[in-house]
Image (cartoon, grey):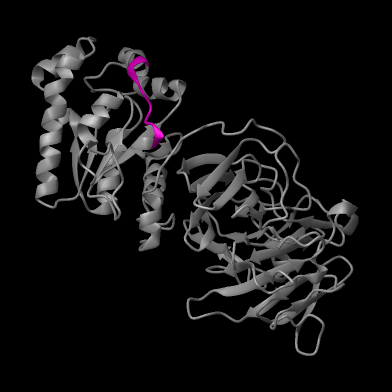
């Protein structure tokens, strides 16, 4: 029989495992509440003799655990036979223990809560009234055999609040987005694919750690610095003009732009009765550019083979005295790469907010001049010499009308477009096609996207990188929104903003 093989549909039972102090009980109960499922803790199946033995500081032996695991398995079989849904928590330190609970039960999805030795020790030291003494932690860590890829675990780090751990689990299961909305269809199927956990898949370099996602012929690489998207390859063909491993990020490639995309003129804006001054990061133009999180090391929150969630905290600071938690999920699916950015105001006052992301698309041409561009936008923003908007006008009759596919030629673009024409599913598609017209990549703009910036890279600091790709930037607001207020999100305390965009390759391999 298969060991812990994921089902084709959502699981009927979720088995949450981890050592003492990992928060199994708290996370299991919260997860069951969010799902509306039954909850059982494996500790309930221990005999009084076993409880007394552990309370005396004596670890259980394998012979002690045999009847205990059998009792849990019997209950799980009854739940499956009765078609009940449940969350079960159990330490299940060894592979043999997990096999005893999952072998022959394809309805079971394994969730592994991972934490550092120091964090686990500190949690146990502060715990009161539990029969498991803190000094047994070392014996558990000695016995621990972490779940292997063929067990298909969902792995979540515990160095975050229990509610965030549960949200990460639900996101990986495809049952719920980070904003709490129910997912369906292919998302649920995708989340149950093989899972691995590798804290250091590549040696850290100028961009910190990096993680590779794989699904079929697709692969993507995400880096820790700024949570940036470094690479996306389909059938061996790069679709991003990104940056190689070991190199610094230049030109904003793949970076997340939070809490504003593009520029704030002079870095100075008025909000909430105050005049605030941001650092000038585009000094030559006297602007603050592309937000405050580009050079922050983001934290890994959850990972599967084909999905990854990173997060960070935007703390109050000069020019932006607001508290915002930000999370980004990258997920490979049947249609390509999907990116979702959530930002939650965890402070006490309303915060100005905008978001964007800065990937450069390529279809394999030496320069972008011969590539065919489609931008389904009815308006463009005219800008001054500092890149700040001075007006909006229709694209009709201008060289910037790309509503019908045509070659870029020598046209220089660093242009924001709006008035996006959307399909019935609510998405607007920006397309970059090979000159043959037979293959290309679509960048779709979903929830939270009102503008798109298109940049041909003519002003990049590296002359050899100019016009090698087309930056197509999904944006929630236009440049200089902090000053103009145009389509600026007023993120109230406790509120969450969501931005969704993705890449869909098309044409023959």
Residue 59 x, y percent position in the rendering: 24, 12
Give whichever of 494, 216 is nearer the camera: 216
Q: Quadrant of the C terminus?
A: bottom right
Which residue is at 30% across, 23% downward? 94
Residue 160, by quadrant, is: top left
* Residue drawn at x 75%, y 40% as measured from the top left: 247
Q: Note whether residue 479 is visible.
A: no
Most prominent secondary structure in the magenta stretch?
loop
Q: In the rendered image of this protein, does residue 314 appear above or below residue 433?
A: above
Q: Position of residue 169 (x, y in %)?
A: 38, 46
318 part of magenta stretch: no
467 or 256: nearer the eye?
A: 467
Expressed as whole percent of the image width and height from the top left, the position of residue 386 reads 86, 65
52 to 456, vertically: above or below = above
**Would you say 446 lies left or right of 260 here?**
left
Residue found 78% across the figure and 53% down from its top? 251
* Horizontal side of residue 495 vs 431, given as left or right: left
144 drawn magenta = yes
Q: For the point 50% across and 54% down, which residue is it?
A: 332
Residue 489 in view (yes/no): yes
Which residue is at the front of the view, 429 or 311?
429
Q: Report the span colored magenta.
A: 142-149
């Amino acid at each position: 029989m298969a060991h812990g093989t994921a089902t084709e549909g959502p699981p009927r039972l979720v088995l949450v495992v981890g050592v003492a102090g990992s928060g199994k009980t708290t996370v299991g109960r919260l997860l069951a509440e969010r799902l509306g499922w039954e909850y059982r803790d494996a500790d309930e199946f221990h005999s009084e003799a076993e409880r007394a033995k552990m309370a005396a500081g004596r670890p259980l032996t394998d012979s002690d655990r045999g009847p205990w695991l059998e009792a849990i398995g019997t209950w799980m079989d009854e739940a499956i036979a009765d078609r009940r849904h449940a969350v079960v928590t159990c330490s299940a330190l060894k592979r043999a223990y997990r096999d005893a609970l999952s072998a022959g039960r394809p309805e079971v999805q394994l969730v592994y809560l991972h934490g550092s030795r120091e964090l686990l020790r500190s949690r146990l030291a502060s715990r009161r009234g539990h029969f498991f003494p803190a000094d047994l932690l070392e014996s558990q860590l000695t016995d621990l055999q972490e779940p292997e890829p063929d067990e298909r675990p969902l792995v979540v780090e515990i160095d975050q609040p229990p509610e965030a751990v549960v949200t990460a689990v639900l996101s990986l299961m495809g049952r719920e987005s980070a904003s709490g909305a129910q997912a369906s269809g292919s998302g649920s199927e995708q989340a149950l694919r093989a899972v691995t956990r590798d804290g250091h898949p590549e040696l850290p370099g100028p961009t910190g750690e990096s993680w590779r996602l794989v699904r079929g012929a697709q692969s993507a690489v995400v880096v820790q610095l700024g949570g940036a998207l470094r690479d996306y390859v389909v059938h061996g063909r790069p679709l991003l003009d990104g940056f190689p491993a070991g190199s610094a990020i230049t030109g904003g490639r793949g970076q997340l732009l939070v809490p504003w995309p593009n520029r704030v003129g002079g870095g100075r804006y008025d909000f909430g009765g105050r005049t605030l001054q941001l650092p000038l990061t585009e000094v030559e133009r006297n602007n603050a550019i592309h937000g405050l999180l580009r050079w922050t090391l983001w934290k890994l929150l959850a990972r599967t083979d084909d999905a990854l969630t990173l997060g960070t905290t935007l703390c109050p600071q000069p020019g932006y005295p607001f508290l915002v938690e930000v999370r980004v999920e990258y997920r490979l699916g049947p249609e390509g790469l999907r990116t979702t950015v959530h930002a939650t105001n965890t402070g006490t006052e309303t915060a100005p907010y905008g978001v964007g992301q800065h990937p450069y698309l390529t279809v394999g041409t030496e320069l972008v001049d011969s590539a065919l561009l489609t931008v389904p936008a009815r308006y463009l923003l005219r800008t001054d010499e500092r890149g700040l908007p001075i007006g909006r006008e229709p694209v009709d009759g201008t060289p910037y009308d790309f509503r019908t596919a045509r070659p870029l030629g020598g046209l220089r673009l660093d242009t924001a477009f709006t008035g996006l024409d959307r399909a019935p599913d609510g998405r607007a598609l920006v397309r970059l096609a090979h000159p043959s017209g037979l293959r290309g990549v679509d960048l779709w703009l979903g929830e939270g996207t009102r503008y798109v910036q298109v940049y041909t890279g003519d002003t990049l600091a590296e002359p050899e990188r100019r016009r090698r790709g087309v930056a197509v930037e999904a944006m929630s607001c236009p440049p200089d929104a902090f000053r103009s207020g145009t389509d600026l999100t007023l993120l109230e305390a406790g509120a969450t903003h969501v931005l969704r965009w993705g890449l869909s390759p098309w044409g023959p391999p």
